[in-house]
Image: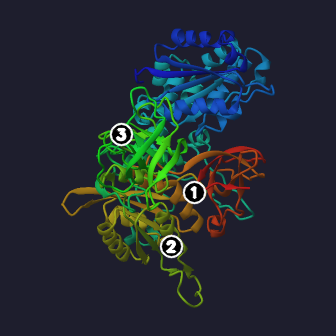
Amino acid sequence: MSSTTLRVALLIISTTAAKDPSTDASQGVLSDLLEKEGGGKWELIDTKIVSDVVTQIQRQIMLWTDVAAETINLILTTGGTGFAVADNTPEAISALLHKPAPGLVHGMLAASLSVTPFAMMSRPVAGVRNKSVIVTLPGSPKGARENLQAVLKTLPHACLQAAGMDSRTLHAGGVKKLEAEAGIKSDSGHSHSHDQHSHDHQHGHGTESHGHSHQHDHGHGHNHGHGHGNLVRHTAPSSNPMSNDPSLGPSRRNRESPYPMLSVDNALARIKEHTPSPEISTSKVDRSLPGHVLAEDVHARESVPAFRASIVDGYAVVVPKDGNMKGVFPVVAISHAAPGEAKPLKEGEIARITTGAPLPPGATSVIMVEDTILKTMTDDGKEEKEVEILADNVREGENIREVGSDIKAQSTILSKGEQISAVGGEIGLLAAVGVAEVKTYRKPIIGVLSTGDEIVQHDRPGDLRLGEVRDTNRITLMSAAQECGYEVVDLGIAADKPGTLEETLRDALRRVDFIITTGGVSMGELDLLKPTIERSLGGTIHFGRVAMKPGKPTTFATVPVKNNAGERITKVVFSLPGNPASAIVTFHLFVLPALHQMAGVHPAGLTRVPVKLAHDFALDKARPEYHRAVVSVGRDGHLVATSTGAQRSSKVGSLRGANCLLCMPSGKEPLRKGARVDALLMGGVRSE
């Protein structure tokens, strides 16, 4: 395990301690515990005290997790976890978590329950926000100490993973090595089960049953089961080395998939590992820039404002040493916001000036028009001749924006990794300082292909013949990719013939960076995508089955090609299931993170938020499911999810109106109304 010192922040949640910090006893206890039992791995770098108020708790947590210059690895809170009316800590923290950590909660409760049954009166919460692990502890110094002792030795492992350390590196040597490094002892049965888990993590092997613990920990998916039949398999799967050889005919095809069943998390890990790194290009600062990610810091070419400017309508003056500006003064010049030359201003003279206009040379302050009286006009009555100023004790610099007061020349205005939006002001910021071009990560060009002899154009006139299916997927996926900000090429429909499919894919690899196909990835004799990728194009299939519903036959592959410069590069091919719901779910779950990675977007993939279920949801007994649903925010501020209805993978109507995918676990019993699950947001949250 890394020897890096981990940074800790402590938030004491107590209205009493907020008024009198001397009443808190938790800080000393926890600081002492980190120092004496933390193995030298922890540094307490900040402690704050807030009242039992949700907004105050959340504000301080977000300052540490979202704003702090350096990552805070662990945030501990004490207080507010009981049943009292003012105990709001679990609710405040739960709403902020990106990833819950029920294992840490279980560990703390188990340790406390071994001491007293009254430990069940505590409501701890734990999880991850951005790169920080957050753990809530009781307000009692004794309870806080017991809870932290229960999980302290495992927390470095959690913090390193949350901070982004490579899991393969972290898990090298297996769980026994991790236990030894952490100073943890376990019985043989416990150790054995975790060794198997570690093996799955490193090699991605194992069928659906072997990966159950990993899937359960991350809470993925379920099958809603609205009255449609489930697939029935009467024999156990085994392992074959490769996809079908189409030349051997249907009698020699594999009778089961040769690809091991991966959990969703293992599949995402392989996508992250094998997706090419982003390429850097130069982009013009214009309307095409939004959506791109900066590949380097951007510095201001000039200061803003570039001149001393007035922030009010009024009169530019030269302030005398005594600051007394009372009196009648001649108006000798006019300064508008339009560019132009201005004569120097002398003491005893004033110049009328508008908001944003440059100060005349020599001017040291601006008097607001509200602090003046017009005394005389020019003979034609069109201009001011003399103005009386009523201001006393005027200081230099009043009502003036100094050069560079907004942005100083050569200062960093945007940082590497920031994504340019159309609504966040980044374009205006770049324009304000004269930046015409920036280095960005090039967004991949996507090609979308449908396969199958039965597929016909969605807009073909006339009725369908027996067996024909309108091409729903291609237009849907092209629209989804375009909505996400990517250029899309329509690759059409390829017939179920090996030569035709190979020719189509080879042409596509010359035209685009990233290929999405639908259909042809199941077990039929005409499902040719996998054999064409492996046998004809020399590609590598990194996974061909995922333990999820819908989308089990999802396939991720890379194909080696040469670019125009003759250099060997890798291009990505996603072969998604042909059923419409499966195709769009797997696009959002698997394709989008790969596109984000190639475009430099971080974090990659859909935003994950915790939601409450608006009604009971049936679960699939064997596989997790990504349930299409609508998330809305209630009047109480909580996010609530409602199913879109029947979830059969071929039922395209299940996507109508959906703005999220609910990560539902497998299970025999339904999840009841009010249960909390994670939702992956595909669109904006609605209001009730």
Disc 1 designates what residue? Answer: 682
668 left or right of 289? right
> Looking at the rendered structure, which numbered label has been put on residue 475?
2
Q: Separation of disc 3 and disc 1 at Cα?
A: 56 Å
First-in-chain label (3 vs 2) = 3
Residue 132: percent from the left, percent from the top? 52, 31
Check disc 3 and report the residue beneath it: 363
Q: CA distance from mark 2 to mark 1?
A: 17 Å
Residue 464: % across, % down:
58, 86
| Alpha-carbon span between mark 3 and mark 2 | 64 Å
Task: Name the image colouring.
Answer: rainbow
Seen in the picture, residue 443 relative to 349 is either above or below; the reply is below
The residue lying at 66 percent from left, 52 percent from top is: 222
Check disc 3 and report its element: helix, strand or loop.
loop
Residue for point 51% across, 48% down: 374
| Left or right: where 471 falls relative to 69 | right
State if disc 1 and disc 2 touch (CB < 8 Å): no
Q: Element under label 1?
A: loop
Q: Is residue 275 visible?
A: no
